[in-house]
Amino acid sequence: MPATDHKTTTPRLLLDVRKMQHNIERMDTRIRGLEAAIRPHVKTCKSIEPARRMVREASPGITVSTLAEAEYFFRHGFTDQIYAVGIASGKLDRVAGLIAEGLTLRIIIDHASTSGHVCGRAMRLGCSFPVLLEIDADGQRGGFAPDDPALTLLAQTLERSGCTIAGVLTHMGASYHCRDRACLVEAAERERRAVVEAAEALRRAGFECPIVSAGSTPTARFVENLDGVTEMRVGTHVFMDLVMAGLGVCEVDDIAISVLCEVIGHREHSGEFLVDAGWMALSRDRGTADQEIDQGYGVVCDEKGKPIEDLIVRATNQEHGIVARRDGGPVPDGLVEIGQRLRILPNHACATAAQHAGYHLVGTESGDEDWWPRVQGW
């Protein structure tokens, strides 16, 4: 644990290990029940200890979002990975180096114009890049339509350059805009249909397409049928957050991370309080702003993690958060006091966790002194 991250420091990121374990087990049970595997997306946790708990016996490997993650988890023994961001040509030498060291690192291509860079570098380096072709299931991201003839043409071009077609991959980002269960169930089925249709087209063209990868935490929670899908990529489920609670994916009490802070000021004219956690500790994510309940920059809890009436962080500066009632009225006398410690539940677990170097653990027998570091950078 870094010397500056000691027990009395605020703000600091807390992780409730019991809640995390419950979230992992619930998702694992659900996906196994649909006869698919989970390939955990470790971009949320970016830490070896949560990742070890997320990877189950049937897990085919992990998903990463940065090459820094790929290197970090490779050093910790994870040798089967998908780098689930459209590949930048400037990163191909680094990918090739990791492959040469023994890492199975699949890259994704979401547009035919990218293939020239990949094919050229593959032939120059003598590296058989394993490639997943990204499928656009919702019209909101990069990728090929499932019935796009360019899909098989690109696969043929890549194969001629020495690359291998590992399969297809998609992500239903539109699921985050759903507002009821029916929408989420339909989004999950659209995601499944799109990636399976693309896989079938490639197989008709003579490609094995062994990986058919789908997933987001909302669609994994509400999917009813995974026929044809080999794996689901989920990551936010490990911690959950207020956006997930707003979608009905979890309850507020399932959220495993929070930011501990201290009340440092009182704005008597407005009845609001200041805490020492601003956007540098909480992030600027406002993912609940267009949901039924706007949670501001986070829900305010007492030091044990229980929400306090209807208090939220209304606004943030770099190092200050403004605690207020959701309806704009003054905070009742005696509810919050200067010097009091509070916990703030995050809108977006990935964004809030990214503000911190690691997790201070709670919910363990050893109390909150244990520390799990996170990998940072790209």
Image: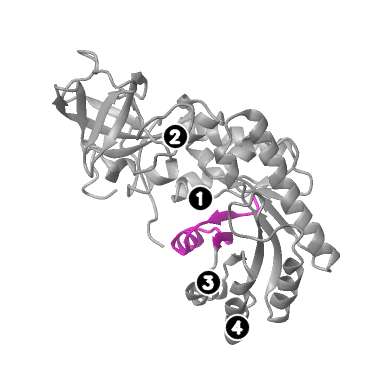
Label 2 or label 3, whichever lies nearer to me, is 2
Which residue lies at the image location 68% right of the left edge and 34% below the top edge?
A: 185
How packed mark 3 is, by other alpha carbons closer than 10 Å (few <14, some 14-19, many 20 or more), is: many
Q: Residues under labels 4 and 3: Cα distance?
A: 14 Å
Amino acid type, callout 3: Val
Q: Residues under labels 2 and 4: Cα distance?
A: 43 Å
Quadrant housing residue 184: top right
Q: Would you place residue 182 above or below residue 11 in this image?
A: above
Position of residue 41 measured from the top left corner of the image (x, y, whole percent):
55, 50
Front-most of residues 22 and 247: 247
Amino acid type, callout 4: Gly
Label 4 or label 3, whichever lies nearer to me, is 4
Q: Residues under labels 1 and 2: Cα distance?
A: 23 Å
Residue to which mark 4 is pinned: 120
Residue to which mark 1 is pinned: 42
Residue to which mark 3 is pinned: 95
Position of residue 287 measured from the top left corner of the image (x, y, whole percent):
44, 39
Amino acid type, callout 1: Val
Which of the labelled discs sits on residue 288, or is there none?
2
